[in-house]
């Protein structure tokens, strides 16, 4: 199993490791809730080296992205980042992706770890395109939290705006920076060559970032209602069903567009709902949901450290009566839960 | 990993303490809280409820998973630790003292046969 190159650094910080998409990554250091609150209230640093990323260049790069992905990359200029998705021919989500656009024809494409090879293959086959994996050569750290600007300024000298990307130098090597993350907080994701990863982590910790594991990254993204591929999104779920129609640009051709258009006119067979529970008990993946004749189940759920109640997202069959009670079955007992228009927190 | 003297331990990673009046106090071990991670919810039985040895009497939920707590003896719940309802994190910070779960009144003659600290230490390695 591949490891983050920073494994010994994390061990020295007391990390526990777990498997994320075939990579052994830090799950937690002191505890999920402490790390969650550090990111909400000050600043945390995550090792997200397991996330997929490849560089896409060449005269055909922009055309390939427009064809393969459902958002329109031409809506953003060089120097910006975009959230988008790769769909299959039936409109299901093969992966959700962040793209960093450094120049007119120079991109980093960042899918989840799991479908990395399939997506790289799709792009490598496109004409006029050079697709080069950069994941195994670089360490990727995410600095997130209300105090991230000061930490970034002190450690790397670049404080990107939201969804802005930049390049720079760190330890006499290249550095790629993006004002993105997965927590709802301000911050940046920073890539440097493997050999400079330890120094980057040490520099961030030295100026006040708290080490945070992927356990808290999951509760942080859930509080923002951000989907996790494999739980909230999969190849049988379309962006329309997931409540992410804003990611679909209908004014261009892309893989899966016909199926999505048919779904839009025929109506959806399932739709995403978000809810909060009345007590601290966490809803969990697979728990049944119902609302009148509408039935379904929880996709993602956990305890919200900020709200101190259970929160979750799931899929149910339409139509949903927004005035009807949504109910959740927890170990044999049905209980009323409150429908929420995500995010669960204002940010 | 803390394994205090003066307690007995079960294979479900609970500790059991026989009190002066013969009733038993029950909680989960340091090993168990560490494996669960941050505990966020506990469902305790009502005082007066009957419990059966070997059957689940409480549920613990952490950010990672849900677990049952099993009764070490049969009997009646004479106290339940309400502190855990509002502050379940006490289970992580003080599993052997502040975070006792319940007191059970019943036949405690089987408790002596549970694991002593040395046996539990070997068991939980």
Image (tube, rainbow, N blue to C red):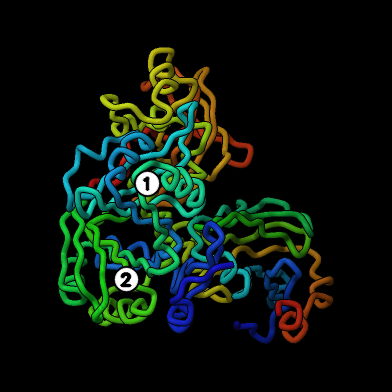
Report the side of B66 relative to A153 (left or right): right
Is label 2 in a helix, a strand or a loop? strand
> Which is more toward the observer, A200 or A244?
A200
> Which is more toward the observer, A236 or A332?
A236
> Which is more toward the observer, A291 or A85?
A85
Residue shown at 53% from the left, 64% from the top? A23
Q: Which residue is at the far front?
A: A128
Q: Position of residue B113 (x, y in %)?
A: 84, 76
Label 2 vs 1, first from the N-terminus: 1
Q: Identify the residue under disc 2.
A: A192
The chain holding disc 2 is A
Q: Identify the residue under disc 1.
A: A97
Tell me how far mark 2 sits from mark 1, CA to CA.
20 Å
Residue shown at 36% from the left, 45% from the top? A226
Label 1 Cα neighbours within 10 Å, binned few <14 / some 14-19 / many ≥20: some
Above or below, A282 relative to A245? below
Question: Which label was assigned to residue A315?
Answer: none
State which quarter of the image contains the N terminus of chain A.
bottom right
Residue shown at 30% from the left, 56% from the top? A181
Residue A200 in sight in this render: yes
Q: Position of residue A6 (x, y in %)?
A: 43, 76
Report the side of B1 relative to A298 (left or right): right
The chain holding disc 1 is A
Q: Position of residue A66 (x, y in %)?
A: 31, 36
Q: Position of residue A256 (x, y in %)?
A: 43, 28
Above or below, A177 relative to A155? above
Residue A310 in sight in this render: no
């Amino acid at each position: 199993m591949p490891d983050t190159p920073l494994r010994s650094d994390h061990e020295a910080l007391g990390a526990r490791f777990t498997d994320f998409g075939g990579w052994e990554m830090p799950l937690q250091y002191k505890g999920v809730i402490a790390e969650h609150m550090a990111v909400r209230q000050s600043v945390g640093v995550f090792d997200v080296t397991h996330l997929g990323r490849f560089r896409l260049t060449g005269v055909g790069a922009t055309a390939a992205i427009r064809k393969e992905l459902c958002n329109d990359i031409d809506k953003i200029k060089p120097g910006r980042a975009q959230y988008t998705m790769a769909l299959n021919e039936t409109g299901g989500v093969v992966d959700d992706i962040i793209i960093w656009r450094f120049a007119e024809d120079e991109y980093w494409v960042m899918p989840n770890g799991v479908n990395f090879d399939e997506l790289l293959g799709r792009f490598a086959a496109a004409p006029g395109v050079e697709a080069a994996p950069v994941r195994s050569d670089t360490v990727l750290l995410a600095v997130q939290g209300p105090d991230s600007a000061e930490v970034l300024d002190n450690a790397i000298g670049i404080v990107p705006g939201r969804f802005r990307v930049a390049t720079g130098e760190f330890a006499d090597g290249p550095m790629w920076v993006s004002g993105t993350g997965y927590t709802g907080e301000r911050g940046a994701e920073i890539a440097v060559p493997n050999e400079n990863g330890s120094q980057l982590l040490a520099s961030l910790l030295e100026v006040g970032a708290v080490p945070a594991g992927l356990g808290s990254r999951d509760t942080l993204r859930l509080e923002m209602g951000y989907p996790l591929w494999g739980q909230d999104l999969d190849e049988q779920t379309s962006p329309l069903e997931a409540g992410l129609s804003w990611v679909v640009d209908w004014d261009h051709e892309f893989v899966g567009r016909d199926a999505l258009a048919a779904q839009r006119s025929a109506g959806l067979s399932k739709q995403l709902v978000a809810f909060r529970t009345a007590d601290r008990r966490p809803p969990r993946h697979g728990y049944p949901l119902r609302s009148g004749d509408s039935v379904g189940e929880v996709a993602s759920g956990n305890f919200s450290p900020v709200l101190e109640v259970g929160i979750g997202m799931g899929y149910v069959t339409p139509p949903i009566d927004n005035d009807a009670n949504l109910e959740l079955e927890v170990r044999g007992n049905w209980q009323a839960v409150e429908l929420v228009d995500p995010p669960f927190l204002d940010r | 990993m803390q394994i205090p003297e003066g307690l007995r331990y079960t294979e479900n990673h609970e500790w059991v303490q026989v009190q002066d009046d013969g009733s038993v106090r029950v909680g989960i071990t340091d090993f168990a809280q560490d494996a669960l991670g941050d505990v966020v919810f506990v469902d305790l039985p009502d005082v007066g409820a009957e419990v059966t040895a070997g059957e689940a009497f409480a549920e613990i939920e952490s950010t990672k998973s849900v677990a049952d707590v099993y009764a070490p003896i049969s009997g009646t719940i004479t106290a339940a630790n309400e502190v855990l309802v509002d502050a379940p994190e006490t289970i992580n910070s003080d599993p052997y003292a502040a975070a006792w779960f319940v007191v059970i009144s019943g036949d405690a003659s089987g408790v002596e046969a549970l694991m002593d600290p040395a046996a539990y230490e070997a068991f939980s390695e």
